[in-house]
Image (cartoon, helix red, strand yellow):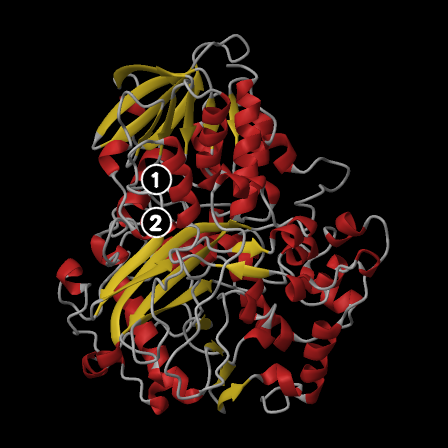
Amino acid sequence: MNQDPLQPVPKPEGVVPLPEREALRLGMDAPISRRDFVGSTLIGTGATLLGAGAPGALRSAHAQTVGLPLTGLGADWTGPGGVGDYARSNGNTHEVLNAAHGYVRNRDIDERLASAADTGETFDLVVVGCGIAGLAAAYTHHKARPRSSVLLLDQHPVFGGEAKQNEFEVDGTHLWAPQGSTGMVFPLNRAKDYNFYSRFYEELDFPREFRFQEPKNLGTRDLLVPGDMWGPMHISWEAADVGYFFESKGFVKNMWRDGLRHTPYSESDRLSFMTAELHRSRDRRPDWEPWLDSMTYSEYLRNELRVHSPAFERYIGPVNAAMGCGLGPDVISAYSAFNYMAPGVVAQGRDLTKGYADPGDTLYLVTLPGGNASIARRLVQKMIPGSFKGARLTELLLGGIHFAALDRAPNPVRMRLSSTVVAVQHEGAPAKARKVIVWYERAGKVHKARAKAVVMAGQQHVNRHICRDIPQAYRDAMATFHHAPVLTINVALRNWRFLDKLGISCARWFEGFGWWTGLRRNVLLDGKESMPLDPNKPVVLTQYNPFLLPGMPFPQQCTAARMQLFHMSYAEIEAAVRSQFTKMFASAGFDAARDIAGITTNRWGHAYVVAPPGFFFGKDGKAAPKDVIRKRFHRIAFAHSELTGAQMWETAADEGERAARQVLEVI
């Protein structure tokens, strides 16, 4: 798609207005937990702040943003958040975006900094951002100096960053699903071999191995249900019964098992698919890592594998993007694709002399009920007494957060949520300063506190606005970080008999809204199931939806993709999900009005940093910008998984630890 970035950005495929009669047929008026919250309109107006002018503003979009305020979003844009502790924190909500765009990006609050209320507090360490990196930084500091004072500040109502969960109550069954970050790599010894490991796992007191539940009451008795939602997307397609939906043919089951013979793909395309998938030979050149980082994944496929197939790139693009690369083959570095075990390039992970076969054959993922919210919860529990009740794994993962305990003065580690940090600056000349001032907005008031050191655990597109006295070299490095959005949708169903009848556990489709969803076998916690896996009982189906605009230049593609995400109202997304599910599953008895119990959307406008060629190892003889940012600037250090180019909980924790150790040098 060679879209002119100056022209209006279209809605994603499948997002179209519905006639009222069709909306009613799909259950848009059904009494699920949404319209008590947003009103009774069938199709909401959504992000009116962006309006018709937003796409035209791409004229000046060189990186993260467009020349518009991007404030004024309302609750009809966010939609319902389900039940439980995370009900007001489903992704980047309208409150979060309004504050981030207004206070941080647009600096609407700067005139109030001089009159900010001084809290009178001086902490040994302030951590800005309560995602995994920020929590790991605070934990590292606390473990090194248990009596030292630490304050964590976060804009969201709940800690965790993208490691949060959605919860539903459906027909007496409680359901959990991840909002974003999910998955721990096992077995641990193999995870170490493939660099999918963090020593922080030793701190979590989680099991060293897990058992998975088995499905019950299946009509298709040999239905293969995977243990995680990521592998069957492509890495381990053999681990599930996958239905590939083509509008011209319907479902083709397990297309890879017979060489794609029953798909609509041409013989030439089928050969390209198989060539990419069956490539197993490593390039033995000693500089293979910077070599891969010198080209896009598309260039690797075409020049190294001789795979010239737009159909294959359209197939693999959403897999690349959703798993962690953010965008597709036309943009991402081949080394970024390697990090997420993409076809062809994954061969570089094979080392038969050491007994290393394909990572997908020796590794598996463990997904706890709410994804990696479990890791965030454990770190908080270890730092802040009383934040959770009970020590058992089920009590930690399935119980509630004691929010009143998070900001108690006697505790050495404290956490202040719904607090938007707007400015950070050394008190005096950075080289001589003994303290750093941190300004933040909370409940409409601007406050300031001091710290001996600060860890900035957010993304660089935010840090370059907040950090007021960093040198130009840091700003230039931060400006090279470009992010792609992901929309995580969790659909709570009253049953999944339609999947059982179709004989599939996962679905992939190629036209319309979205591209993938599926079942997973949950792990047993304290020997028990957290949720049923029975086609007659409720379940949550998760979708990780990227926004790909192949052919549009980078980084404008990131900005245009984000505009697509921002332009959709909750009601439009809901209608698109209902329509897509009906198109695919109605023939097997699915009824959207009857079977959908709830839909929660989680918008992550800057979900993944996009790593084009040169991101990892630099180019033209210059160091990679990430290596500039990794250096402490006097009393300020930076920590985020994006500084590795591979955003996983393990890299986030390791970056948090590194930054904490850097500031310990000056405290």
**563 or 358: nearer the eye?**
358
**84 or 628: nearer the eye?**
84
Q: Quadrant of the N terminus?
A: bottom right
State the image quarter where residue 27 is shown.
bottom left
Q: Position of residue 356 (x, y in %)?
A: 75, 59
Q: Which residue is mark 1?
A: 100
Q: Is residue 339 left or right of residue 391?
A: right
Q: Residue furthest top?
A: 432
**Residue 479 visible somewhere in the drawing:** no
Q: Is residue 164 left or right of residue 62?
A: left
Number of the label disc, if any, that sits on residue 384: none
Query: In percent of the image, x 29 and y 73: which residue is there?
Result: 538
- Which of disc 2 and disc 1 is earlier in sequence? 2
- Camera-near label (1 vs 2) is 2
Q: Element at badge 2?
A: loop
Q: Element at badge 1?
A: helix
Q: Is residue 196 left or right of residue 22?
A: right
Q: Which residue is mark 2?
A: 92
Q: Position of residue 312 (x, y in %)?
A: 64, 75
Q: Residue furthest right?
A: 285
**Residue 184 visible somewhere in the drawing:** yes
**357 or 530: nearer the eye?**
530
Badge 1 crowding class, 10 Å Cα cut-off, few under 14, some 14 to 19, many 20 or more, is many
Q: Position of residue 328 (x, y in %)?
A: 58, 62
Disc 1 marks which amino acid?
Ala
Look at the picture and state if 447 lies above or below 21. Answer: above
Query: In percent of the image, x 80 and y 52: which residue is there?
Result: 288
Residues at marks 1 and 2 touching, judged by CB atoms closer than 8 Å: yes
